[in-house]
Amino acid sequence: MLEVTGLKVSYGGINAVKGIDLRVGTGELVTLIGANGAGKTTTLKTLAGLIRPGAGRIRYDAHDVTGRAAFRMVQLGMALVPEARGVFGRLTVEENLAMGAYCRHDRAGVIADRERAYSLFPRLAERRRQFAGTLSGGEQQMLAIGRALMSRPRLLLLDEPSMGLAPLMVQKIFETVRAIASGGVTLLLVEQNARLALEISDRGYVMESGVIALAGSARALLNNPQVRQAYLGE
């Protein structure tokens, strides 16, 4: 579904991504791990059309989408859940979900998907009339994921969904990510909790200083001594 070759991204005189290759097959859950500043978020933003690459190619669903605008990528079926969640604080939960479906015109389908988001996150249903800015961090993360799903993505990009959340909420978010993948959505996940991410993934990449340092099956990376020492605290 996604094939990235030779991707380079620079801004402010910094070479953030230095010619990486990665791929995500249809139906896969692939994790990208690495230390802060490795270039993971920049990579996701570039894939989603928020940053223009300096070099390289991005192919999505067999089409060259290099440099396409973000709203075009949403129309093509790719959605990003950003690192800082990015909810619209002065809109209600329900209005935030509606914003996720801005490019759709099937009203009945939108309503059905909104109810599906509420069934996935019952807490959002309880707070549907509440302003998003008053939600807890975990609730805002649920809302950000639910909003992205409202566009009916075939490829979902998740940037650090567990960041800053309490352990119980982290567990809930990962259960949800697994459920989304089981429902047929392809996922590319950037996550600081390397162990949890790899445990639910098919494959993984390790990014260091703008390059891909390691790649392989999730099981192989979990058992890799370098990964265990650097990212699993062993």
Image (spheres, rainbow, N blue to C red):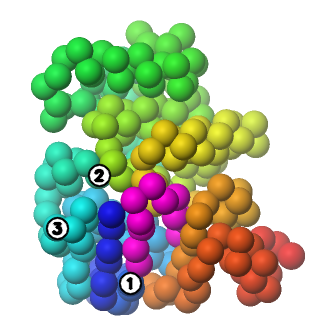
Residue 131 in sight in this render: no
35 over 133 or under it: above or below: below
Spatial distance from mark 3 to mark 1, Cα to Cα? Answer: 16 Å
Q: Is residue 228 left or right of residue 99?
A: right
Residue occupying image coordinates x 60% and y 51%: 163
**Residue holding disc 1:** 21
Between 212 and 110, the one lying in front of the other is 110
Residues rendered magenta in the picture: 22-32
- Report the mark closest to the observer, 2 or 3: 3
85 over 207 or under it: above or below: above
Residue occupying image coordinates x 75% and y 37%: 168
Mark number, residue 78: 2
How many callouts does the rendering have? 3
Q: Residues within 10 Å of mark 3 (few under 14, many from 20)?
A: few
Quadrant for the C terminus in the image: bottom right
Query: Please, what secondary structure does the residue beneath circle 2 have?
Result: strand
Indicate the amino acid at tag 1.
Answer: Asp
Between 121 and 40, the one lying in front of the other is 121
